[in-house]
Image (spheres, helix red, strand yellow):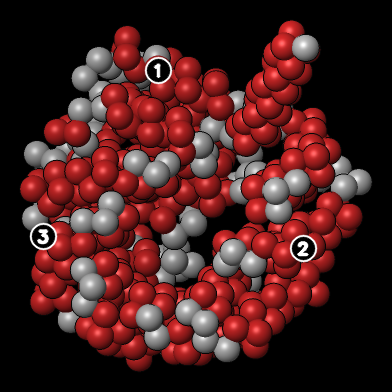
Amino acid sequence: MNTKKYLFAGIFALSVALGANAQNEAFRESLKPIAAALEAAPNDVNASKDLVKAYKKQYKKDPAAIVALGYSYFGVKNYTSAIECADLALKINNKFGDAYVLKGDVSSMQDDGGAAAGWYQQAMHQDPKNPNGYLGYANVYRKRDPQGAEDAINQLRQTNPDFPVDAELGHLMFNADNMDKAYEYYSKANMDKLNEGRLAEYALVAGSVNQKAKALDIAKFGLSKFPSSKAFLRLAIINAVGTEKYDEAVNYAKKLIAEEGENNSGDLIYYGQALSGLGQYEEAIAKFNKAIEVDSKNIMPYQHISETYAKMGDEDKAIEYSKKYLDLNPNAKLSEYNKLAAIYMAKVKKGDGVEDNYAKAMQVYDDVIAKYPQVKGWALTQKANETFKAEMDDQALELYKNVINEISNSTDSDDRGYLTTAYRNVGYILWSSKGDPAAAREYFEKTLELDPENSLAKKYFEAEAAANAEATEEVATEEAAE
C-alpha cells in the first residue's frame, strides 16, 4: 500500500480539528509554538517538553485540542506520541471521532490499511455525524473497493445531511483517477458551498473530461468568490484558450502577468496561445520566446512557435522550430510528428519544391517507423492519407495498397481501423478518380467486412445496384421493342 495516498487524511482531519474549534483562539495560538518547536527539532523529545506539559494541563478536558496536538506530532512523523494523544483524547471522551481518525491516519502512514479502516469504522460508529471517519475509510478503499468507498461517504446523507456529500464523492473519484465519476458527482454539488480547493478541483475535473466551457464557468465563479486566487485566474486562462475565447484569455493573462510578472513559463505559453488565436502572431511568438527564456527546460514553446509560423504561412520557420522541438523531445507524440509532415505537405500544395518536400514529408513517417516499429500501421496510413489529401491519387493508391500488404494479417485493433481506411480509399480512388468501378468492388467488399456500416462502401453498392437495375430495364425495353 502506498502511504502517500493517505497523507491527505491526516492533513484534512487536522484542519477540521482546528477549524471546528475556531472560536477557541487560545487553543490555536497555544499550539503554534509547540508545532514550531517540533518542526525545528523533530527527533528531540525534550525540545517541546515543557510547552506540551503546559498545553495538556490547560486543555485536559478538551479532546479536540489534544487531537490537534497529536496531529502536530503526526506532522513530524512521531507516531508514538500522536497515538498517545489520541488515547488521551479518548479518555476525555470515548466517542470523540477525530481521535479514532488520528489512529487510522497513523495506521495508514504505517502501511496498515486494514487497521486504518478499522479505526475509521470506529469513528463512524462512535461519532456518526463526524465526516472524517467516513472520508478516511473511503480514502483507504477508493481503489481496492471503489463501490464500498462510495457507499461509506453516501452514509453521510443520513447521518449528516448538511455535509457536502457530492463534493466529497467527486474528490474521492478524483483521487481514484475516475474523472468521469468525479465530474458526475461534482456536477450535483452546490458550487456556493464548495471551498476554494474543491471548487478548483471541480474545474480541473471538468477540463479533464473535455467539458472546457463548464470548466471556464467554474473558474469564473471561483474568481467571483475568491478574487485574489491565482489558481482560478490560471484555470480561466487555460479554459478560455480551450474554448477558443481568446479575447477573454488575453484579458485574464494580462491581469495575471500584471500581478505576478513574466516569470512563469506556463502562463506565458497560454498567453501566447491566446494571442495566436486572435491572429496576433508576432506578439504570440514573443511570449513563447519569453517562456523559453524563463524556463529553458520547457520545450513546449518550440512547438507553439512552429504552429504559429505555420499559421502565418512561413513554413520554413515552422519546420525549423518543429524539428527543434522533436529533437529535444524523446517522448514526442505521434500527432507532433504528423504536424511536421503536414508542414512539408503545405509546401507541396503551394507548388514549392514539390518532389523534395514530398520526400521529406514521407521521410518523417519512415523515421517514426524506425523509432517506433509498433506504430507502423499508423505511419504507413498517414503517408497515404497526406498524399491523398494533396490529390496525388496515383501515389496515394500505391501507398494504400502498401498498407494493405503490410498489415492485412495484423490482429491489432488499431491496425483494423487503418486497414479499413486503406480499403475504402483504394475503392474510392478506383471508382471516382480512375473511373473503374469493377476494380473498386473488391476493396469496398473488404471495407464492409471490417466496417459493415461504412457509408462510402454502402453508397458504392447502392450505385451499383441502381446501375444494374437500369441496365436490366434497358435490356427489357429493347427486347419488348423487338
Of residue 302 and residue 97, the one placed in the foreground of this image is 302
Amino acid type for the residue under numbered disc 2: Leu
Q: Secondary structure at mark 3?
A: loop
Residue 425 shows which numbered tag?
Answer: none
Q: Choose mark 3 or mark 2, whichever is in front.
A: 2
Q: Residues within 10 Å of mark 1 (few under 14, many from 20)?
A: some
Q: Position of residue 11 (x, y in %)?
A: 37, 48
Q: Which residue is mark 1?
A: 154
| Residue in the picture at 30% in, 29% down | 187
Determine whether 76 is above or below 220 in the image.
below
User: Among all residues in the image, which is located at the extreme right?
Assistant: 409
Q: Are marks 2 and 1 in contact (CB under 8 Å)?
A: no
Amino acid type for the residue under numbered disc 3: Ser
The quadrant in which the C terminus is found is: top right
Q: Which residue is mark 3?
A: 228
Q: Earlier in the sequence, mark 2 or mark 1?
A: 1
Q: Secondary structure at mark 2?
A: helix
| Residue in the picture at 29% in, 24% down | 188
Determine whether 169 is above or below 351 in the image.
above
Determine whether 24 is above or below 303 in the image.
above
Q: Position of residue 195 (x, y in %)?
A: 21, 41
| Residue in the picture at 18% in, 81% down | 261
